[in-house]
Amino acid sequence: MSPDLSAIGRLLLVGGGNMGGAMARGWLDAGLPQGALHLLDPRPGPAMRDLVEAGRLTHSTGVPSATFDVVLLAVKPQMMAEVLPGLRPVLKPGSLVISVAAGTTTATIAEGLGAAAIVRAMPNTPALIGRGITGCFAAPGVGEEARRAAEALLSASGPVVWVATEAEIDLVTAVSGSGPAYVFLLAEALAAAGAEAGLDPDLAMTLARHTVAGAGELMLRSDEAPAQLRRNVTSPNGTTQAALDVLMAEDGLAPLLRRAVASAARRAAELSEPAK
Ligand SMILES: NC(=O)C1=CN([C@@H]2O[C@H](COP(=O)(O)OP(=O)(O)OC[C@H]3O[C@@H](n4cnc5c(N)ncnc54)[C@H](O)[C@@H]3O)[C@@H](O)[C@H]2O)C=CC1
Ligand SMILES: O=C(O)[C@@H]1CCC=N1
């Protein structure tokens, strides 16, 4: 069921790139009222330009001279220090600020903007098709109504989960924010392995894409845990077992992913420091 976005008011999206663009499409598809969305971006990507040309949102390359009920920050973390002070005039008492920037803390945003109600959110790019998941943290100044507004907006991209501490957002980033890239890499590596083993490369890619997508869909729809779904594929002493003996070895996939997730979380923490 689509969230009710009729009470969101005026929404400013700052940065319409990969993530901001995916979220904007989700809001418009979920029925955000005509005229409610304004994009601030000096160089919006082609998908956003198409939406502007279709009249589904307004756009400016500079800070608009209006105030907004919600401001969603989707610029690179490295841009934040430069962008935040210029946005002060678009806020009014009670404006809600949502940031999806990896690493940038609510304290940094509060300092740069002088804003009180700040939600840090970590979505992911499957938001583009309404199949993302978003982890959120509400800073202490966020009231119940603002929290509900944030949840309504973010749930246009898929489920929303709340974490109790800001440090957990860096971990959400490392698991689900960056996670789609790990899955795409798995598809790339599976296709490359098939091609190296002798399959036509295009055929290997088709097999890999459908396998990753089908397994993902099955995992989401099934009541069985991923470990049971894995067992369902694995015949005793069969082909899957032969592959899993490699993937589940002491130096297999699990320790590799542990290192990858730890490295992403470390980078998120680094990004919260100035000039990184
Ligand atoms: N791409 C992803 O999978 C995810 C990204 N994020 C976060 O989303 C944020 C944006 O990332 P992407 O969309 O991937 O980057 P991107 O580079 O695709 O988009 C950034 C956009 O910001 C615009 N921009 C640059 N300077 C600006 C300014 N002064 N005012 C307004 N807009 C400006 C750029 O023109 C560009 O369209 C980052 O902070 C990232 O940490 C969060 C979750 C997932
Ligand atoms: O790579 C990044 O820093 C961003 C945050 C999560 C996904 N993309």
Image (spheres, rainbow, N blue to C red):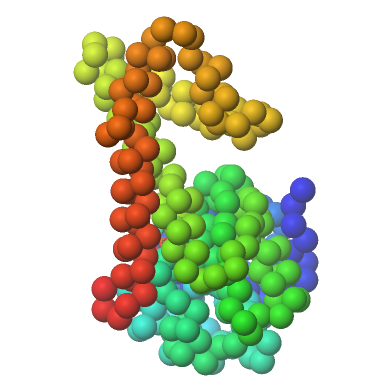
Quadrant in the rendering for residue 173: bottom left
Q: Is residue 256 above or below residue 156?
A: above
Residue shown at 48%/9% (left/top)? 235
Residue at the image point whose x is 43% and y is 27% from the top: 209
Q: Quadrant of the C terminus?
A: bottom left
Residue 187 lies left or right of residue 177; in this view the side is: left
Most foreground residue, 186 or 169: 169
Q: Is residue 22 above or below residue 271?
A: above
Q: Which residue appears farthest toward the front when viewing the image?
A: 250
Check the image and report above or below for 193 versus 23: above
From the top left corner, tell me how far across and down residue 192 is, in percent.
27, 25
**Residue drawn at the location 56% of the way across and 24% of the way down:** 229
Residue 203: x percent and y percent?
35, 16
Q: Is residue 255 above or below residue 249?
A: below
Q: Which image quadrant for residue 112?
A: bottom left
Q: Is residue 54 visible?
A: no
Q: Please name the residue shown 66% across and 69% down the image.
A: 150
Residue 237 can be seen in this image: yes
Left/right placement of residue 95 relative to residue 185 reads right
Q: Position of residue 63 (x, y in %)?
A: 48, 84
Of residues 265 and 245, the one nearer the viewer is 245
Q: How many marks?
A: 0
Q: Position of residue 153 (x, y in %)?
A: 66, 64
